Every structure is written in C-alpha cells, then in structure tokens.
Amino acid sequence: MEIKSNKFKNFCKRYGALTLAGVFAVAIALTVALTVGASTNQVSTSNLSFQVPMNNAEIIKDYSDQKLQYNAMVNKWEIHLGIDFASPTDSSVMAVLDGEVTDVSSNSLEGNIVEITHDNGFKSVYSSLGDEVLVKEGDVVKKGDKIGEASNSAGREFDDENALHFVLMKDGVEVDPNEYLDLGNK
Ligand SMILES: [Zn+2]
C-alpha cells in the first residue's frame, strides 16, 4: 500500500508537471500569436505615413463633419469634409502618399481637381488647384511629387486667396485628415 501510494503520488507529480507545462506552452503560443498579430496590424497602418500636401501649410479652415462653419462665398453655414490649406511661402501642392492619379477634372465651384488613389482604400482629392495641373489620369506619383499649385479656382470657397481644399477618403468616405497627417505644429 505504502509503495502503491508513493507510485500514485509520483504519477500525480509527473502528470501535474506535464499538464502545467502544457498549459504554459499553450499560453506562450497564444501570447506570441496575439503579439505577432497585433504588431502586424500596426505595421500595416504605420507604413502609411502621409505627408502634408503643402510646405509651411496653415490650416485656414479645418475639417468638421458636425460643427457648421460659415462660408462667406456662398453665405451658408455648412460642414466641411476636408481641410483648407494655404502657405505663405510656397503654393506647391504635393501628393500626400504614393499612388495613381485616377481623375483630373475641373468645375467652377471646386476649381481644378486631382484625385489620387492609394493602397489600403485611401484616396486623396486636391481641389482649387491652379490651371497648370502637372499630372494626368493614369500617372503614378510618389509621396511629395508636386501635382500643381494652390489657387483661388474653387469659386465656392475662395475669393482672392490661394488655397487648397484637401479631402482624404477611406473606403469611399471622407475621413478627418487630422487623424492621418502630422499637422501638430502646422
Ligand atoms: Zn474647403
């Protein structure tokens, strides 16, 4: 009996140790899997490092999807699903990310417009460009490539100031560029 019970105790010790080892192994494997998964997600978003579309850019009208802002040109209070930029030193407008030019158009309300399609469902749209647009549909552009200059061609927003109406879209919906562009001290 004494011997048998010792054997049983030894068995329990071994079996218990194995079970514990097994639980630890599963826990470690899960932790590694979750960590790798999480960091993979982070990498895929942090790779999208947008640049600001103008040098020394100043925000002259910020994004607002709820708060109404007054637009003197049309005498209306309205939401503003983009950011208006102007620069005191350089009117150049640059692509915010690598991509392909998927539309170049023009109308009297928004002026000359360039649309660039990027990876991960992003599109950037630049309105109120001057008449000299430097890209055409189908062009592949790199982040920082100049596509045109800010002007007052968007008659519905700008009078005599040269500015850029910039829109960022994700999966077909306007998003707040403040969440993607580093506008910290701009
Ligand atoms: Zn605007």
Image: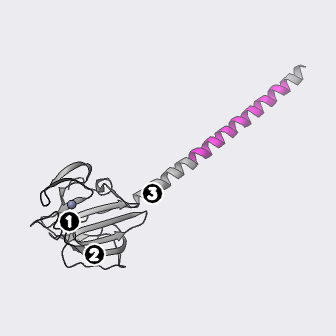
Residue at coordinates 69% horizontally, 38% vertically from top-left? Answer: 21
The mark closer to the camera, 1 or 2, is 2
Residue of label 1: 164
Quadrant of the image where one finds ligand 1: bottom left
Q: Earlier in the sequence, mark 2 or mark 3?
A: 3
Q: Is residue 134 left or right of residue 73?
A: right
Which one is in front, 30 or 152? 152
Q: Which mark is residue 43?
A: 3
For residue 181, what is the image quadrant? bottom left
- Decide if residue 96 is in sight here: no
Which one is in front, 24 or 52? 52
**Where is 159 relative to 147, above or below?**
above
Q: Which mark is residue 30?
A: none
Residue of label 2: 105
Residue range highlighted in magenta = 6-32
For residue 152, what is the image quadrant? bottom left
Q: How far apart are labels 2 and 3 at the CA level?
A: 34 Å
Label 2's element? strand
Label 1's element? strand
Q: Quadrant of the C terminus?
A: bottom left
Question: What amino acid does circle 1 point to?
Answer: Leu
Which one is in front, 91 or 122? 122
Residue 112 drawn at (x, y percent): 23, 73
Magenta part mainly helix, strand or loop? Answer: helix
> Is residue 8 part of the magenta span, yes or no?
yes
The mark closer to the camera, 2 or 3, is 2
* Residue located farthest toward the right when viewing the structure as drawn: 1
* Residue located farthest toward the left when viewing the structure as drawn: 160
Q: Residues within 10 Å of mark 1 (few under 14, many from 20)?
A: many
